[in-house]
Image (tube, grey):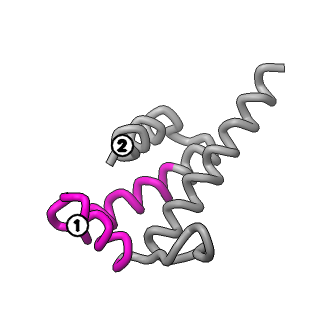
Amino acid sequence: MIGPGLLVLRLALATVLVAHGSHELFGLFGGPGAGPGGLTQTATHFASIGLAPGIFFAVLIGVVRLAGGALIGVGYFTRWAALAVAVFEGL
């Protein structure tokens, strides 16, 4: 019973991370509550909170969330992807 539960948790986490990464990079899944997305909006947000080159951090964190979520969902390099997401999720 532990296997199916962990699979559901891993797929749920992957779905959330892929959705957030694609919203930050491409502006997908935008709307009421989520706000406008895309690199410009994300870079402006990161620059406003003090992360100096906003576009650099927007691309870096968006790619880590998108690729990390995809890797976690598929099950490849799960521990490394989870570590990368955990490190950059605090930003």
Q: Residue furthest right?
A: 1
Q: Residue at x 73, y 35 (%)?
A: 7
Q: Residue furthest toward the left? A: 52
Within-10-Å neighbours for mark 1: few <14, some 14–19, many 20+: some
Q: Left or right of 61: which side holds 77?
A: right
Residue 42, image quadrant: bottom left
Query: In the displayed structure, does residue 12 sit left or right of residue 62?
Result: right
Say what amino acid the circle numbered 1 marks.
Ala
Tag 1, which secondary structure?
A: helix
Q: Which residue is at a point 62% across and 44% down the rendered structure image?
A: 13
Quadrant position of the N terminus in the picture:
top right
Query: In the image, 26: left or right of 9?
Result: left
**Mark 2 element type:** loop
Secondary structure predominantly adopted by residues drawn in magenta:
helix
Question: Going by the picture, which residue comes out furthest to the top?
Answer: 1
Q: Is residue 71 above or below residue 6?
A: below
Q: Nearer the viewer, residue 70 or 13?
A: 13
Q: Is residue 10 left or right of residue 18?
A: right
What residue is pinned by disc 2?
90
Give the residue type at disc 2: Gly
Residue located at (32% from left, 60% from top)? 60
| Magenta-drawn segment | 40-68
Taking 91 as reference, is 28 above or below it? below
Q: Does the magenta run of residues contain 65?
A: yes
Residue 47: assigned label: 1
* Residue beneath the point at 81% across and 30% down: 4
Q: How many numbered marks does the figure carry?
A: 2
Q: What is the x, y in percent for residue 28?
A: 57, 75
Query: Of the numbered discs in the image, which one, if any, rests on residue 7?
Result: none
Q: Could you tell me residue 34's position as x and y percent?
A: 56, 68
